[in-house]
Amino acid sequence: MNVILILIPVSLAFAGAFLLAFIWSVRNGQFEDTDTPAMRILGEDDAVRAPLSNLSEPETENLK
Amino acid sequence: MQATAGFDSLIDRDSTARSSERATVCFHCGSPCTAAAAAELGTASRTDGKSFCCAGCKTVYELLSENGLDGFYNLAERSGKPVTVGANAVVDRYAFLDSAEVFGRFVHFQDASVTRVTFRLPAIHCVACVWLLENLFRLNPGIGRSSVAFTRKEVTVSFNPVQIPLSKVAALLDSLGYAPDLNLADLERKSDPVSRRLWLQVAVAGFVFGNTMLFSLPAYFGLDSFSGPGFKVLFGWLSLGLSVPVVAYSALDYWRASLFAFRQRRMSIDIPIAAGIAAIWLQSVWEVVSGRGEGYFDSLAGLLFFLLCGRIFQQKTFERLSFDRDYRSFFPLSVLRIDSQNASENRVALDRLAVGDRIRVRNGELVPADSRVLSEGAVIDYSFVTGESIPAQKTAGESVYAGGRQVGGSVDLEIIKPVSQSHLTSLWDQDAFRKPKGDAFDTLTHRYSRRFTWIILGIALASCLFWAVRSPDKAVKSFTSVLIVACPCALALAAPITLGTGQRLLGRQGIFLRNSGVIESLARVDTVVFDKTGTLTVPRSGSMRFLGEPLSALERRALFEVARHSTHPLAQRLVELVRPLSDSSVSSGRSTEAGMKFQETLGRGVSGFWNETEVRLGSRAWLAQTGIAVPETTDDSQSVWVAFNGKFRGGFALSSPLRPEVDTLIRSLQQDLRVELLSGDSERERDRFSPLFHGLESMRFHQSPADKLSHVRSLQDGGRRVMMVGDGLNDAGALREGSVGVAVVEEVGAFSPASDVILEASRLPQVRNLIDFSAAAVRVVRISFGVSTAYNLIGLAIAASGNLSPIDCAILMPLSSATVVAVACGATHWAGRRCLGAPLSPSVAESNNPIPAKTTTKEEKQS
């Protein structure tokens, strides 16, 4: 049964990783607006040119 | 109801006129194209054989197709919003946005190369809108990423202020048919950090709940026998470690709330919850540290997980609605100021207006501050601020109050009071707007838990004393066990689940509540007070009634031809009444009869000839002045008088039609509630409403906004719980003062004063059902309390005997919560079906349908 001593940290690490992923997604604002992304996907993605790179700002700005 | 019938027949006639033209509709917005417009625009270049209703729609189409954004039309056919202004004319309108102080308030992120701004665009309505607005960068190189929040109808745009000023961004949106709704009050609303924290708290509790359950399983199933006691100790310590973030982070709100309640010397549901959490944790820590057991950590994490899930469920908000608007959201952000030196016009921000400034207010615009009229032609519609249904005529030198809407031509005004000190806005200085509404501790749950908590403490102490005498080692354990079991998790879930479900069900009916707690106040309402103009009657659609011998067809025609040349609002309504049914010259709008000698005495009356018939139309005094014998009368309900060929003929009375089913609603409310009418309008409507409202004292006219507030206050002070139903700024005080304020809106998302409930005008007859349903929901909460108490009694019996084991706790707690949730949900849905009937179709209800049906006609929206 000593294998449990290895399995427990592994399982905790896995679950913890999912927790962190969830925390990241909440802080990233993914739960703020759950309707628009569902509609965005319907748009055509023939984007010939992306928005100027110097005009895309850091994601973390959402945090405030 | 004569008036209603007349109004309906007008609508019918309108729609038949339109249906004949439905053959060609605008490729952009789907509005019908008149033959003339289609011919004029259709032959121009680059329209690819598509027809447009106006130059604006065609411009948008060209702009989109030039930039490869035709995809807009593939996503949803004819989904564009009608555009009325050409792209160049709008830039001026937004120029004031570039002035430093306005700019600073709009922009919420700024560095050297990027500025980020959020606009509210009420026109957002479909998938194609989202797509178009997120592809703005293709239309202008200065624009970076833009993202739409569909439910809030907002777009956040990043742009480079060196390449494109803010005013141009706004103008670009406007030229696409998405005119930004610029007002500061809405922008001050930011995303709610509380709900983010709640999600994180749930996540932590859920994570710990799952893992400690795994560690507890060996103990529950007696696996120690073959794995040895070592694991028991290890699992105990692991669970202890995991429980720390739950107690320290997930339970944070309960610690704070109970501390607050304790400081206020008020008993609330949070105190037994916090005591339960503390008892579980301390008891478990003691068991693990002393090596006696593995504690109740799984129950602790589960408890918090369920409690927090209940909170998330309760946090339903209707994002596209704002329940806290005041006059600042109603007034425009900018006004047209006339420079006294060079007589030039420029747009300035509202709060930069000073006393003495001259401003120009155009047709349909609001008077932003108390002012004096400088030019002729001021006709102010006060229906939204005072409830008066007939627009008031003002001559030069008279004062006008803030909030009125100019109808007719443009008028020059001179500001005599600062915006914040005007007659109307001083209403917001009343006490009612300062103190928070309601008592946070006076809810069903808190009232129930007040009794509950003392009983639990009594039982805990009694069992502690009992065991202290019988066998002292069980005394502490039985004390903590009682607190653990009595932790009112199920009780705390009952109200959020029931009321939250109720709020959702009502949302599907087009009835939007500020929060789920409003249901409790609704259930206790015993008096309903209605506003008249705009609430019981349809605003700005007042139809005229002719009093006297019915007019002949010829007279109607003559009247029509003369009245249509006047811009006076009453003449305009008269035109609607006497408009001939089918006549080519009318629908095309061409002017007729070259020699008709039209004359208008501004604000008094008009005269003219049509086919040898002389028509005079105006006020009584004016007719008398021009030498017509007018019979004496005391009836002031008629506001427009008419004479043909110098002979007096009769008068027209203006009356706004009642909304459908209003009489049925009021009668059904009168069965068990007191119903009153508070109107800012004059007495002339009294006779019309007296059959509906019993007794003279239940109807009050000439009520100023402050009168309404104080009347509702005096009713409340007399022990009554008032539901105020109103629509305008003049009801704002009463809406705020009443136990429940219900704002009636023509269109969801349009301006409504601060209130607890926002009701679509078409759902007004549902007020009776709303009250019944709320009462039923409160009964459901009480039943759920009973269920949860029954579980608590079973648990208490075990706990007081000192034999509570972790596994009892692990079964009892989730089971009681699950039962309460099931009972609350099920019973509320049942009550909803019984009281409210079937929900509205999804396009009208809670969230507006993002993918419009391709056959939807725009006529309904425009009529």
Image (spheres, grey):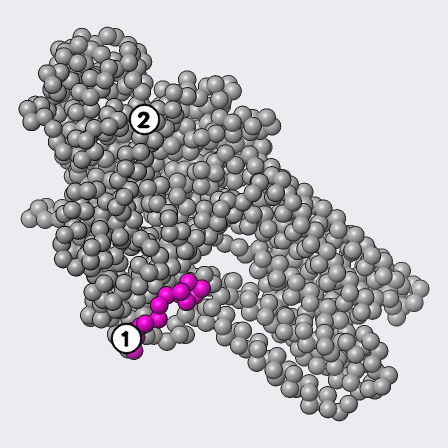
Q: Position of residue B230 (x, y in %)?
A: 80, 87
Residue appearing at x 19%, y 70% in the figure: B163
Q: How many marks?
A: 2
Residue appearing at x 28%, y 19% in the figure: B652
Residue identified by numbered label 1: A49
Residue appearing at x 45%, y 49% in the figure: B843
Q: Which mark is residue B543?
A: 2
Q: Residues within 10 Å of mark 1 (few under 14, many from 20)?
A: few
Left or right of residue B190: residue A18:
right
Q: Position of residue B362 (x, y in %)?
A: 19, 41
* Residue B526 included in the magenta stretch of the image: no
Out of B570 and B402, give the one closest to the viewer: B570
Amino acid type indicated by mark 2:
Ser
Q: Position of residue B37 (x, y in %)?
A: 17, 45
Left or right of residue B234: residue B537:
left
* Residue A44 included in the magenta stretch of the image: yes
Left or right of residue B447: residue B228:
right
Q: Residues within 10 Å of mark 2 (few under 14, many from 20)?
A: many
Q: Which residues are magenta?
A: A37-53
Residue appearing at x 89%, y 60% in the figure: B466
Amino acid type indicated by mark 1:
Arg
Q: Which mark is residue B197?
A: none
Camera sees residue B161: no
Q: Position of residue B24 (x, y in %)?
A: 25, 46
Considering the numbered disc 2 on the image, is that residue within a helix, a strand or a loop?
strand
Q: Report the Cα–Cα distance between label 1 and label 2.
A: 55 Å
The chain identifier of the residue carrying mark 2 reads: B
Camera sees residue B844: yes
The furthest residue to the bottom: A2
